[in-house]
Image (cartoon, rainbow, N blue to C red):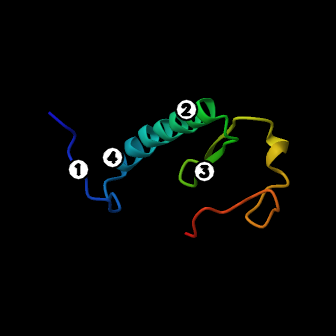
């Protein structure tokens, strides 16, 4: 038995929205950690929720490693345009 495909749209029910946010935030953090461990990529993740004023941050390396990085940095090659 597989997982159901969900329709991506705004959740109206506040309780379900809060639970979904917390579960997906944890899942996103786990994937960021896995990506950095498996590929030695430098990963920075920040998730802020304006409702409860919560912020989680994850840096796979030092926070200062990201200070000079942006899309226009010479050491960054952009693979795709979003």
Tell me the distance, in whole angstroms, between the alpha carbons under discs 1 and 3: 26 Å
Q: Residue at x 19, y 37 (%)?
A: 2
Q: Is residue 66 above or below residue 76?
A: above
Residue 39 appears in which quarter of the rendering? top right
Tell me the distance, in whole angstroms, between the alpha carbons under discs 4 and 2: 27 Å
Is label 4 in contact with label 1 (beta carbons under 8 Å)? Answer: no
Of the two numbered discs 1 and 2 in the rendering, the one whose residue sits closer to the viewer: 2
User: Which one is in front, 65 or 49?
Assistant: 65
**Relative horizontal placement of residue 1, taking residue 64 as reference (left or right):** left
Quickly name the residue at label 1.
5
Q: Secondary structure at mark 2?
A: helix
Q: Which mark is residue 48?
A: 3
Of the two numbered discs 4 and 2 in the rendering, the one whose residue sits closer to the viewer: 2
Sequence order check, earlier mark of 1 and 3? 1
Sequence order check, earlier mark of 1 and 2? 1
Q: Which mark is residue 16?
A: 4
Q: Position of residue 75 (x, y in %)?
A: 80, 56
Tell me the distance, in whole angstroms, between the alpha carbons under discs 4 and 1: 17 Å
Q: Which mark is residue 34?
A: 2
Label 1 Cα neighbours within 10 Å, binned few <14 / some 14-19 / many ≥20: few
Q: Residue at x 25, y 52 (%)?
A: 6
In which quadrant of the rendered image does the N terminus lie? top left
Q: Is residue 1 above or below residue 14?
A: above
Sequence order check, earlier mark of 4 and 1? 1
Q: Position of residue 55 (x, y in %)?
A: 63, 44
């Amino acid at each position: 038995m597989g997982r159901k495909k969900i329709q991506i749209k705004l959740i109206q029910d506040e309780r379900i929205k809060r639970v979904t946010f917390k579960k997906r935030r944890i899942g996103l953090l786990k994937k960021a950690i896995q990506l950095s461990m498996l590929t030695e990529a430098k990963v920075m993740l920040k998730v802020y929720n304006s409702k409860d004023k919560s912020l989680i941050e994850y840096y796979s390396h030092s926070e200062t490693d990201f200070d000079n990085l942006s899309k226009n940095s010479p050491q960054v090659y952009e693979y795709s345009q979003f």
